[in-house]
Image (tube, rainbow, N blue to C red):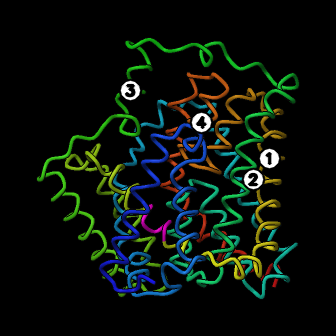
Amino acid sequence: MISAPLPLAAVIAVAAALAFWLDRHVKALSKVGASLLVLVIGALLSNFGIVPAASPVYDAIAGPVTSLAIAWLLLSVNLGDLKLAGPRMLAAFGLAVLGIGVGAMVAAVVLGPTLNGNGWLLAGVFTGTYTGGSVNFVAVGQGLGLPPRLWAGVTAADALTTGIWMAATLVLPLWIGRFFRPVPREFTEIPDDGGSGGAVANHPFFAPASLSALDLAVLFAAGLALLAAADLTARLVPKVPSVLWLTTYALLLGHTRWFHRAEGALQLGTMVLHLFFVVIGIWSRVAEIAAVGVSVFFFTLVVIGVQALVVYGVGRLARLDVGTLSVASQAAVGGPSSALAVAVAREWPGLVLPGIIVGLLGYAVGSYLGFGVAYLVRGLGLGL
């Protein structure tokens, strides 16, 4: 068993690198995605006894290292891009977020009594993750103090339900599309390089990052300064979780002229966040998942089910097209990468950039909403 800190850290780094390599070079696995691959690799390492179930290395990655990833990812969010998403996409994303919040509260009421008082935690975590994806899942889980034994079950249930909803948003437009307005023609045509196509190519989500030593030094300095500022503020205002201060400060700094379009922040944050996914995989012991996974899985189904009713039900009444609704819903549930996948798979190139932008918006607001729903559920005594 590999338990010494340095070799164990090396194994985690290699696991993350392997997942990215498989995602890029093995066509069949590219449909799975690096995030799920790295979870599987971590789980295999743990369940076959190659690495221990607990280690100070995991604590360091789950703590300050992951907080750095959150800071870098939020530095890459530019709320000024919202004008490129358009009012229809923003409205559809708003419906998805509303549906998630309502669904989390309904799930807490229905299933909370079976979760040993943890229903409010799950309501917050799933509101966060289904508003913007993995970065919010990690931030809200950290801030609420999600017990380690629940991380595994929550991660497994989240991965399974996100996959199910990905498939649903791919096929639902075919099944129910006739009941909605048709997808506008401008969304089904490939934009030319002089139009929004140029915006797509130049957006940081797609553009390759060319980092100098100075760029890396600035990003590391900014990240550590943000962590220190958030920690200091949390000590002065202990009722507000440190990660919320980190979110706020990172968003503010990212909109200054010095860090506008911070070069490499998105790529660096994504890479480091996958180290934490390896750790989550390592925590995913089969016996522990079996103990909590079924109830948590049903919790996610209720959340996503209510969200689907709100998105497609209210969306139809608002006369929004099924393409915009599907991409916006997937941007909320799975994040910008999932929105991209749905738009490309259904051949809606005009929805690629709007989907990416609202997915990144989810990064910005997901943590606030996750904490808000969690404390609201607990305050109202729902599902206890």
Measure the C-alpha gap from mark 3 to mark 1: 31 Å
Name the mark on residue 341: 4
Measure the C-alpha gap from mark 1 to mark 2: 7 Å
In magenta, the rendered stretch is 274-278
Which element carries disc 2, helix, strand or loop? helix
Q: Residue at x 66, y 69 (%)?
A: 373
Reply yes or no: does residue 77 show up in magenta: no
Decide which of tag 2 and tag 3 comes sooner along the chain.
2
Measure the C-alpha gap from mark 4 to mark 1: 18 Å
- Residue at image mark 2: 99
Q: In the figure, 70 relative to 58: above or below?
A: above
| Kind of residue at badge 4 | Ala
Q: Which is closer to the viewer, label 3 or label 4?
A: 4
Which element carries disc 4, helix, strand or loop? helix
Name the mark on residue 201: 3
| Kind of residue at badge 1 | Ala
Q: How many marks?
A: 4
Decide which of tag 4 and tag 2 comes sooner along the chain.
2
Q: Are marks 1 and 2 in contact (CB under 8 Å)?
A: yes
Q: Residues within 10 Å of mark 4 (few under 14, many from 20)?
A: some
Q: Are marks 3 and 1 in contact (CB under 8 Å)?
A: no
| Kind of residue at badge 2 | Gly
Question: Predominant secondary structure in magenta?
Answer: helix
